[in-house]
Amino acid sequence: MPVKEKEPMIMHPRPSSIVAALYTLRDLDTDVVILHGPPGCCFKHARLLEEDGMRVVTTSLDESGFVFGGHDSLVEVLEKVIRRFNPKRIGIVGTCASMIIGEELHEAVMDVQPDVPVIEVEVHAGYRDNTKGVIIALESALAAGIISEAEFERQKSLLKEATMVEKRHGAASKEYLEPNRGDLKFKVAGRLLELMKQGKRGLNILNAKKETAFMFADINLAVNQIAEKLGSPIINMANLNEDVGLPKNRRNAREIKEELKNRGMDIHHITGGLDEYPVAGNSANQIIGEKYSDYDFAVITGVPHALPMDNINNMELFSITNGPRQVIPLKEMGHRHVMVEIDLHPRTLGINHIVESEFGATLREMAKDV
Amino acid sequence: MSKQIAIYGKGGIGKSSTASNVAAACADEGYRVTIIGCDPKSDSSITLLRGRRIPTIMDLMRQGVDIEEEDIVFDGYKGVKCVEIGGPEPGIGCAGRGIIVAISLLKKTSKAIEDTDLVIYDVPGDIVCGGFVAPVKKGLVSEAYVLTSGEYMPLYAANNICKGLSRLEMPLNGVICNSRGAPNEENIVSEFAKEIGSQLLAFIPKDVLVQTCEREGFSVIEKEPGSAIAAVYRKLARSIMTKSDARVPEPLDDARLRELTKI
C-alpha cells in the first residue's frame, strides 16, 4: 500500500471535469447533450458549446429532485430531446448533484430505448484533474462503438501528458496562483518589432489546444507577415496535423492550415495535431535542437508551457497564453515576455476561420509605422 | 457462475449475524465465499475475523493511498473473503456516495466478487438513499433475501423493502425469520412470505449463544459448531446455495399487514 505523495491542495478555481466531458462530446460530433442536474450547472460552457452547434439541455433537478431522485425527469427530457431535435447522437452527462444521490443514467436509456447511440458519462466535478472528465467520456464513446480502441489509447496517453504539463508548469503547479494580465502588448510588440528590424532570426511556434488555435494562429500569422516585410528570417512551426484526432480537431486543423497558406504563411514544420499540444512541444524541442538552437528569439502561442526549455533557454521568448493564471508560471520558467489574450476561448467557438487577436492587431498596427 | 445475494431487513434485526453465520457455514461446506459489509459502521465481517477490525475501503481512499486488492480484501474464517466499505460517522458526509465509490473501486481492483461461489452484500437496514442500492443498480446483486421477525415493525420494514425490490425488479429468493420470541411468530412470517409470493426459508430461534459468540469475536459456526443454532444456520446456508425460486415480490397493503400481525 504505497502512500501516494500527497499532492498540495489547490485553492484557485480550475477547469471542471463535467465541462471537459461536454467539450469531448462536442469533438465526437454529438448533436444533443443532456446535463442531468440542476439548471445552472455548467451554464456558461453549455451556452458557449451551442455556438459550436451542439445543443445542451438540462433535466433541471430541483430540491425535490435531489430528495426523490431525478430518474423520471431524465426519461422525460430524453424523450423530448428525441422528438424535438431528432439527433443522430446523444450524450447524457452527470453532475455533482445527480452523482451524489446515485442516479443511474443507464436506467433512463433502458427505459426510453432510443434508436441512436447514447454516450452516458457518469461524471462530477470532484476530480483533481479535469482530464478525468475527458477519459470517462471517451470510455463511454468506446463502449458505444463510436471511437476505436486505438484512438482511445492514443487519447488517454495524450491526456496523461496534458495532466503532467499542468502539474509541472501549469494551473496545477502551485497551491495558489495569482491571476495576472501579463505584460503590456504595446510594449512587447515594440520590442519584437525592434528585434525583427535588426534582422534577428526567430522561431514562430503555434502550440495551441484545439479550437483556441483559431485565434492564436492570428498572432503567428501577424509575426510571419511582419517578419517578411522587415526581412527577418522566421521559421514557422504549428501543431496542425490534420490526420490525427477526433473529427472536429482534424477539421479545424485543415481549416487553419489552408487559411494560413492562402494568406501567405508557409509552415516549415508540423509538430503534431490540435489535440497533441501536450506532446507537440517535445517535437518542436527536438527540431529546434537539431536545426535552430542558435536562433535569437521565439514567439510561442497557445500552451507555451508545454514546450521544454532545453533548446530555447538562450532565446528571448515572447509567449502568449489565454490563462491569466499561466503568467506567473511562464515567467518563472524563463519566458521574458508573457501576454494574455483575455476571453480567447469564447471567441473561437462556432467559427471555421482565423479570428483577430489583440496582440496580432497590435503588431500589425505598429508595423505600419516601421 | 457465482451467486450474488443481498440480505435486507430492519436495522438491528440480525442481518450481520445471519450473514456472517451463513458465510461461515458455506465455507464449511467448501464453498468460496465473499462477504461485503456495506454499512458505514463496518461490523459485518468482524465475527469472521476473530474480532479484528479491518481497514475499510473508504478509510483508505480518504488517506489517498494506492489501493490494491490485498489492502481491502482479507481472509477470514476458512478463507471467507471479507471486505468492509466503511463510511463517515453518523450525521456527517454522505454514506450513500461512499457505497457507490467503494463498489466501483472494488469492481476494478478485486476478483473477490467474481472468482467465488457466493457473494453476500450485507446492506444497512434503512435504504435511505440511492447509494444504498448501488450494488443492485450496478448489477452486482442477482437475488435478495429479507430478514424479519414476526413483530409488526420489522414486518412493516420488510414489506417496505419488498416495495423497493419490486420497483427495482429484483427477485426475492426467500424470507428468513429471525425470532424475537413473539407469539405465533413462525406462522405470521410464513404467511407473510406466502402472500408476497415468496417462501419462509428458515426460522432462526432466539438463542443467546449468538450474542455470546459475537461478543468474543466469533460466529456460532466457528465457536459452537455443535450447537442447535449452528445447525439452523447450516440448514439455511444449504437452502441459499441450492434452492432457487426467486421471484419479484408483491408487497402487501398496510391494512393486510396489520391484520396479519394481530395475535
Image (tube, coloured by chain):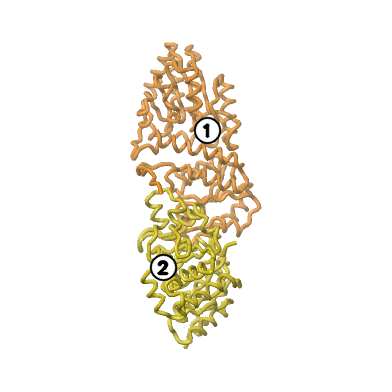
Q: What amino acid does circle 1 point to?
A: Glu
The image shows residue A143 at horizontal and vertical percentages of 59, 48
Quarter of image, res A274: top right
Q: Work out whether residue A10 can be spotted.
A: no
Q: What amino acid does circle 2 point to?
A: Thr
* Quarter the C terminus of chain A occupies: top left
Quarter of image, res A7: top left
Give the orange chain's letter.
Answer: A
- Numbered circle sitting on residue A238: none
| Subunit of label 2 | B
Q: Depth-wise, is mark 2 or mark 1 nearer the camera? A: 2
Residue drawn at x 42%, y 56% as measured from the top left: B57
Tell me the CA gap for discs 2 and 1: 54 Å
Tag 2 and tag 1 share a subunit: no
Side of A14 relative to B257 (left or right): left
Residue drawn at x 47%, y 64% as measured from the top left: B78
From the viewer's side, name the closer residue of A260 and B170: B170
The tint chain B carries is yellow
- Numbered circle sitting on residue A276: 1
Residue drawn at x 54%, y 46% as measured from the top left: A137
- Numbered circle sitting on residue B47: 2
